Amino acid sequence: MTKQTLGIAGILGFLLTWELIPRLGLVEARFLPPASEVLAALALDVQLTAFWAAVGETLVAWAIGLTSAALLAVVIGFLVGSSQFLRRFTNSTVEFLRPIPSVALIPLAVLLFGVKIESSLMLIIYASFWQVFIQVLYGVADVDNVAMQTARSYGLNMAARVRHVVFPTALPYLMTGVRLAASVALILAITAELVIGSPGLGREIALAQSGGAISGMYALILATGLIGVLINMLMRFIERKTLSWHSSIRSEVIV
Amino acid sequence: MRIAKGILYAVGLPALLVLIWWVSTLGAKSFFVPTPGTLAATFAKTWFGDRLFSDVLPSILRLFVGVAAAIILGILAGLLIGSVRWLRALTEPVLEFFRAVPPPVLVPVLMLLMGISDSMKIVVIISGCIWPVLLNTIEGVRAIDGVLSDSAHTYGIGGWARVRYLVLPSAGPQILAGVRQCLSIGLILMVISEMFASSSGLGFTIVQFQRSFAVPEMWSGIVILGLIGVAMSFIFQFTERRILRWYHGLREVENAV
């Protein structure tokens, strides 16, 4: 059997197990509806405008948050990364701020912005900024000395050196950072909606749960997973396209 | 001299930032931003009393149990799936899907299935943290050097010895990369599971402060979560350096060439 057929068999097996667990009464169907029921609910959702509006709100927050975090991280990362002094000066602060869990900011976001998209954006930007920033720092630090000196002796000015030497070196790192940040941003978009109640899929899940629409809730969770898979695929595609010139994916970049 | 310089570099920017914060809150009486003095006093008062035992330590304990269980389960399952080719092909799409599901949505599901209890919070942490460890272990096991694997085979090394001396070391860097992600997800899930459904714990307490507009207390909660995050990352880096000492040494040699 080929890999694809096995993969499909795996998915079918998973759905079958899910279908059987409530049918055989291992878990009450009230708490875990069978797969067929959830898939039916999802099929129903897909025809509704409200569902797509929620998806749209989540994705808008995701896209705005990810883009602004990436832009900020690239600008600050190139500035800090290209100066030995700044790198050492900021190191302790970065190491302290980076592990702070973004959910710690939830109460602050609620106080400052209430249940609006800004709360989601604050969490998304904070969390994805560090992912990209750290990778950009690594990337800028990885510039080959010989290449840099060659560029200097050919009389390339600062801007040209950044454009032709630093940027290509840092690009693979940057893309890894953006790919990681993309999934982190989705997690935080959904989390913010779920916990704070800003508009989007997460809030729909919380509403479905408190309203007792259990198969609806599972359908929405399936939908978030599918969106996550699509985002992963999209990011890998973009990475392949932008790095098509790059001979190998660097082994030290950890997925 | 060199050590003094290092210390100066390490504390320079934080000291500067605190100074700016202190100066900017000196005159103005802002509702949202407490002064450094107030925050420090509130921090000591809020967290070094009964709360340490009723909220902070139980939360940390749940986090520890959940993360440890996720790491062990993830590595065991990863070793199994990674070394059996058909099993890997069979489970890959399903696992990719589970990894893509944002872990916090599992909180309402597990609330339904298990009710609200300590074990539900631990299961939330496990079910969110296991994926990075599991998928990285699978990748690491899959990417074992072919020559090494064949050599081990020729020397008749199999079973546990193979896992101990070939599979775990060569998948180690990947596995630890997964563990690092797992730690930060674990902390997030600890907080969220308590924000959702709890009457004690760090997440609950912080949300409670926010709802009652106890702003300095809320900030002190953010600080304590930050400190836990920083402590976890230090412990991780320390352990990683010990476990992977051979690997970092090897990389240095390779980079020097």
Image (spheres, coloured by chain):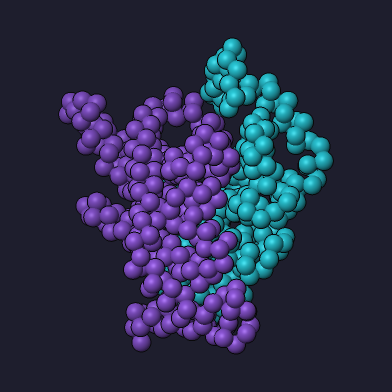
Across and down, in percent, residue B99 comes to: 47, 63
Across and down, in percent, residue B144 comes to: 45, 67
Q: Quadrant of residue A52?
A: bottom left
Which residue sits at x=31%, y=58%? A234
Asked whether residue A24 appears in the rendered view, the answer is yes
Colour of chain B as rendered = cyan
Asked whether residue B173 appears in the rendered view, the answer is no
Across and down, in percent, residue B17 comes to: 54, 22
Which residue sits at x=54%, y=31%? A92
- Image position of B234 (left or right of A57): right
Image vertical order of residue B160 relative to residue B109, above or below: below
Q: Quadrant of residue B119?
A: bottom right
Most distant residue in the top direction: B27
Q: Quadrant of the C terminus of chain B?
A: top left
Across and down, in percent, residue A230 comes to: 35, 62
- Image position of A28 (left or right of B143): right
The front one of B102 and A83 is B102
Q: Quadrant of the N terminus of chain B?
A: top right
Which residue sits at x=44%, y=26%? A86
Image vertical order of residue B252 relative to residue B114, above or below: above
Q: Which chain is purple?
A: A
Which residue sits at x=44%, y=50%? A199
The front one of B38 and A154 is B38
Most distant residue in the right direction: B50
The front one of B94 and B92 is B94
